[in-house]
Amino acid sequence: MKSSVKNNTVPLLALRELVVFPQQVVPLFVGREKSVRAIEEAQKENKYIMLAAQKDARTSNPGPDDIYRVGTLGEVVQLIRLADGPIKVLVEGKTRAEIKEYVQEEDYMVVEVEELVPSTEVSTELKALMRSVNSTFESYVKLGKKVNPEMIMQVNAIEDPSRLADAIVVQLNIKLEDKQDLLETLDPKERLEKILGHMKSEIEILQVEKRIRSRVKKQMEKTQKEYYLNEQMRAIQKELGEKDDFRNEIQELEDKLKAKDMPEEAREKTEKEIRKLKMMSPMSAEATVVRNYVDWMLALPWNEMSEDHIDIEKAREILEADHYGLQKVKERILEYLAVQKLVGSIKGPILCLVGPPGVGKTSLGRSVARATGREFVRVALGGVRDEAEIRGHRRTYIGALPGKIIQSLKKAGKSNPVFLLDEVDKMSTDFRGDPSSALLEVLDPEQNDSFNDHYLDCDYDLSKVMFITTANTLHSIPQPLMDRMEILRLSGYTELEKLAIAKKYLFPKQVKENGLSPENVEIEDGAYIELIRRYTREAGVRNLERAIATLCRKGAVEVVEHGKDHKVVFTAENIIKYLGQPKFRFGTSEEQNQVGTTTGLAWTEKGGELLIIETTVLPGKGRLQITGKLGDVMQESARAALSYVRSRAELLGLPRYFYDKVDLHVHVPEGAIPKDGPSAGITMATSIVSALTGIPVDKEVAMTGEITLRGNVLPIGGLKEKALAAHRGGIKRVIFPKENENDIEEIPATVRKDLELIPATHVDEVLFEALVCGSAEEFRQLIDRKNMRDEMLFSDMKVDSSSGDSSEKEDQVGIVTH
């Protein structure tokens, strides 16, 4: 070979996207001017030419740096000039060669090359490798179907490992870089190992492709088979003269559509879907989806309305018959109905009934439906966290359905029902969307005449629907949603109201449900009071109804045992026999005046509650410990109260630096229940002052109010509920912020009659009313003498004997409500 190449210099042909191997015959179309000249020069001389691949095929005029150094020394076998300019040349690779130097680059490239001769030694390991390569190549050819099967025999006949590797690599579908790497690998053993790896990778890919093709083929065969059998079945039914049920069903749908009163947009959409249904096979999945959609469109009450019968007197009678008390709420509902009758349109504020559980929010919605003669539907929104629950799913999803709004209208059968959205404050949000945002359109009278459900995909008019919502609290309702509603608050019932409700509503209902008659069972007023005070503690009447139901069941057992003429009378004395020991102590106020123990008032979702705050003084270094599972705001109130007490140390008769020698521990019992809010500020201050001075707190006093560092008492919320809780707990006097005086009118008259309501603007006034002092005039005089450092504010006062000695006082604790 070397003797055939003059001075080891040959023309160079740069190849695009191609690597030529030894023993490979390749046809090439040459068009670049330099490449054509190189071919012509090789044809003139000895027909040898260097074939090397370009690194980047997009380079039109490659230089030395753009061409791989290792290529194949080849021979021009045939050259044909084409009419349009390029030439077609047939070259055969002879041996590997490396470019040592570029001799010429102007007209065409001439390079000095050195042949690379691989090893010809064949070891036992190499023979085993060759067999493995042959076997793998055979599997590759059978799977790929792109290589001529005759190549298997040709490859098996090759005994030289280097030639074997070169013969196989040209048949593989691998990248240019991988082929160049194999060309540059001189050792036959290493080259065969790389080829084996490439073939195994290709075989894995081919196996996956084969499985995919097989699955697709089976699916197509199954579909074709089903279609063929369906056509056969249809032909058989036609021959037998049987009815075409599917066509009859479509005819029924068309007849229903003609008779249905619906908007034009909905009619056109339904007609389009029915036409589409005609073209489908009845057994196809798509036909089922379309059929369900058409059924929904025809089942909705698009323009079907209940006739309004708004009679204010009748509505008042219904509300009074169904609910006791709640006068303000009843008045607002009657105003609402009167406006609807005069205006003739439902557009107006959406009512939102807010109150603790069991006060009758849901049943008020039913009463409104009765008063107007409309259908009533209720949707419970508690726990709803998917926007599609309101707006529905698009039909692209399997099992898609309209949202709860459209489903409830179908259930009602009318487009103008009374629609109760229950527990609107219990909705939550996650990655599936925010249902409260979807309700914005539903509850907006300016927008809901074109409500678009995702499933229906056309507008539905909700403007005739009377929406009423209910909630226990407002803080969890988004502000934009709250802005669309008018808030009506339902507070808890007083003891007298509960007694009247139990006698008038609950007892007759449970007597009937338990198969009894008024002659069989009787509950005395004393027993009702005992149930309300010691067996239930709630703002509503649900647990009271359960307790009455329990008594009725006990009575039913005795009636069955002793005969239908037997009568059971429940009294305050024998009720413990049927219900067991009382669950609650009537009120949580203390039985005696105690040091460091203060009764406060708290608001909860179930109404008002009494909470006790305990404070004890311990030897220490001024640390304040706060326990009872208190929130951040309540803990800050405790710190503010202590800061106020420190600032008034001289006035309160405390040493100036008393806090350097003692620790204070403030605790709110019932530690498993979370508590928070600023309204316990004055209660904590009173408890701390009592513990430090040794003066007990009046057991008949409860208080609520936020405290500032200057001792001002700021207004709070929920005064009515807190006053009801104080009344239930046997409290005689309630201290509250003076700025809340306007809220006193909301407190029932019977409660105001039994409570002494004391407004306060400063903590000094609170201490004067709450602490048990010897003389009111003496207390006032000591408050005014602020400049006397050594005067002890309460040194001359008589402490209630029930407070115990000084050591006992030190261990007392104070209780505050939040």
Image (tube, helix red, strand yellow):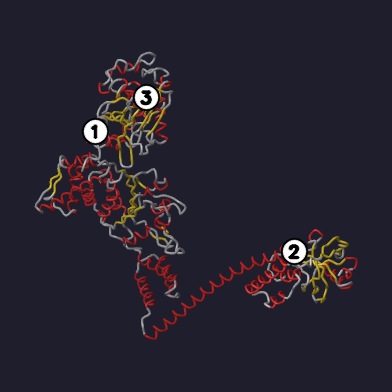
Residue beneath disc 1 = 730
Q: Earlier in the sequence, mark 1 or mark 2?
A: 2
In three-dimensional space, the C-alpha distance between marks 1 and 3, rounded to whole angstroms, equals 29 Å
**Taking 12 as reference, is 602 left or right?**
left
Horizontal and vertical percent for residue 88?
79, 74
Disc 3 is placed on an element classified as: strand
Q: Is residue 248 left or right of residue 225?
A: left
Q: Position of residue 777 (x, y in %)?
A: 28, 17
Task: Name the disc covering residue 180, or none.
Answer: 2
> Quick one: label 1 or label 3, which is nearer the N terminus?
3
Residue 617 image label: 3
* Three-letter code, disc 2: Gln
Q: Judge whether 675 appears above or below 364 on screen.
A: above
Q: Amino acid at mark 3?
A: Val
Say few, some or many: other residues with alpha carbon within 10 Å of mark 3 (under 14 / 14 to 19 / 20 or more): many
- Residue closest to the eye, 305 or 98: 98
Residue shown at 38%/13% (left/top)? 790
Given residues 189 and 33, the one toward you in this image is 189
Query: Can you tell which of label 1 and label 2 is closer to the viewer?
Result: 2
**In whole angstroms, how far apart are the C-alphas of marks 1 and 2?**
98 Å
Quarter of the image where the N terminus is located: bottom right
Tags 1 and 3 touching, CB below 8 Å: no
Residue 94 appears anywhere in the view? yes
Amino acid type, callout 1: Gly
Establish if 760 lies above or below 228: above
Helix, strand or loop for disc 2? helix
Image quadrant occupied by the C terminus: top left
